[in-house]
Each structure stands twice: as structure tokens, then as C-alpha cells.
Amino acid sequence: MTSFYTSLNGLKNSQTDLSTIAHNIANAETTGFKKSNVEFADIVANGSAANPRMTQGIGATVAGINQNFGLGAIEQTGRSLDLAIDGDGFFATRNAESGQVLFTRNGSFQIDNSGTVTDFAGKRLQMFEVDATGAAINVPATVDAVIPTTNGAGSALASITIEKNGLINAAYADGSTTSVGRTALATFTAPTGLRPVGSTNWEATGFSGSATYQLPGTGRNGQLLAGSLEKSNVDLAEEMVGLITAQRNFQANAKAIDTATQFSQTIINLRS
């Protein structure tokens, strides 16, 4: 009977592998998406006290599904509120209702009617406040990125530019400009410990550690690339090879179950 359970575990593992690869392939064009891969570990029947020469393997189990945070290709869009990061940092966005802060590599933002910079789900981009010279103040405390839609003279907002160092500049119809804030980036001690929550967002966990907020260009954060977006880091050719391998593993385990069934039937026939 051991062979049945061993092969059944193999089937389940292959299904997990196939599902993970299919998820990667489905998100090959998703902005800021990070691929995952399944890690397996073997299972043995006997404990450490058993004779090592008699230790029997009884299959494998899924040890973990690991996220790969390697940098995806950078695609230029020409849109001023499209941002890419050339390092390990994450954008921080806050849910205005719950206060929950999530982290993303998808830098596609917009401005709502109140002048708040948000993602397309309405979560608010986090930034550092600045003084009159554009220097960040109160770091690491972050605030919602809000751009005044009119200046003190009543002139309407004309355009926005974001520099590599995260400085957000607002230009108005009367020709005046003002520095609004500096985009905050977050890094983690162990980013693979972040929990994916969908829509290329992650939340911090005890495995990832708390977010460290810094300016772009500081430490591992990387600089901002305005007018660009980071594409998915999925390599379709690599995933297709993995898909074929997982399919063959599934078929091999199914064949092993079929063979074990034939052996069992032969034994039953002999006894009868």
C-alpha cells in the first residue's frame, strides 16, 4: 500500500507545480507581477533511530512556494505618473478606510478629484513631506501623496514631474512650480516572506519583517524611473519547459499507481 500513498503524494505535488506554473503564465503580462516556484522535500518512513541502511523513502511533499523578486523588464510609457523602480524597493499604498498599508511594484498611479495620488483601486501612494528646498523631513514617517489642484494664486494644476530621487514637482498654469513631497520606498529584511494579497500587492508578515521606509536611491531601494513601468518577471520559455516537466511527473506518478494496482490484483488472484 505504501506505493499507492507515495504515488498519490506525487500526483498532488505535480498538481501544485502545474497550478503554480499556470499562475505564472497567466500573469506574464501583469505589471509588477513576480513569479513563484514550488520547492519539494523528500519524506522517509523511519525516524533517526532506525538503521540508516533500512530507511525507506515514501515520496515527497511541498516544502514551500517561493516568490522570485527578480527585476522585470522596464517598459517606457511616457506617462508622468507611471513609475518603475530599478532596485529592491516597493511602493507603499494606504487604504483610506481601513488604514492598511500594502506594498507593490506596480507603479501605475493617477490623481483623483481631490489631488490625491492613488493606484487604480484607490489606495493612496505614500510620500515624505518636504521643506521649502525640497529636502525630506520627518523621515521615516509617511503621509498620503496629495498634490494641490490650484496654487496660492488660484492657478490650476498643469502638469506633474517625478524625479529619480522621488521629488514630486507640481507645475501650474501661471508658470509657477512647487515641490510637493518625496516618494517613499519600502524595503524588507526578507521580501520572500511577504504575503501576496492579489492585484500585485503584498502585505508585511513576521517572516518578511517590518517595512523600512527610505528615499529612492538610498540603500537597496533603487531610483525611480518616471514614464516607465516594470513588467512581469515571468520568462514564458522557462515556464513552458517547467510545464512539460510537471506534466511528465504527473503522468509518471499516475503510471506508478496503475502498476501498483496491477500488482495488487495479481496477488489477490493468486490467493483466490
Image (tube, grey):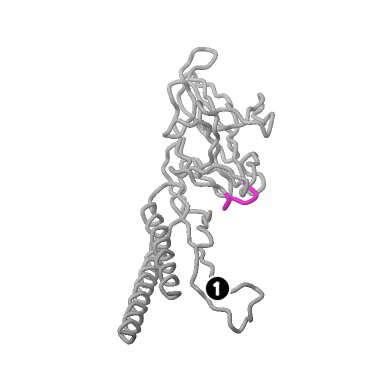
Looking at the picture, how far across and down is residue 212, in whole percent?
A: 65, 41
Of 123 and 206, which appears nearest the observer?
206
Residue 219 sits above or below residue 53 on the image? above
Instruction: Name the residue rendered at 55%, 49% in the picture.
Output: 86
Q: Which residue is mark 1?
A: 45
Based on the picture, tell me whether residue 125 belongs to the magenta stretch.
no
Q: Quadrant of the N terminus?
A: bottom left
Looking at the picture, how far across and down is residue 249, in whole percent?
A: 39, 72
Residue 145 placement: quadrant? top right
Secondary structure of the residue carrying tag 1 is loop
The residues colored magenta run 188-193
Q: Tell which residue pokes out farthest to the front in this image.
A: 272
Looking at the picture, how far across and down is residue 46, in whole percent?
A: 59, 74
Tag 1: residue type? Ala
Q: Quadrant of the C terminus?
A: bottom left
Instruction: Name the residue rendered at 57%, 53% in the picture.
Output: 192
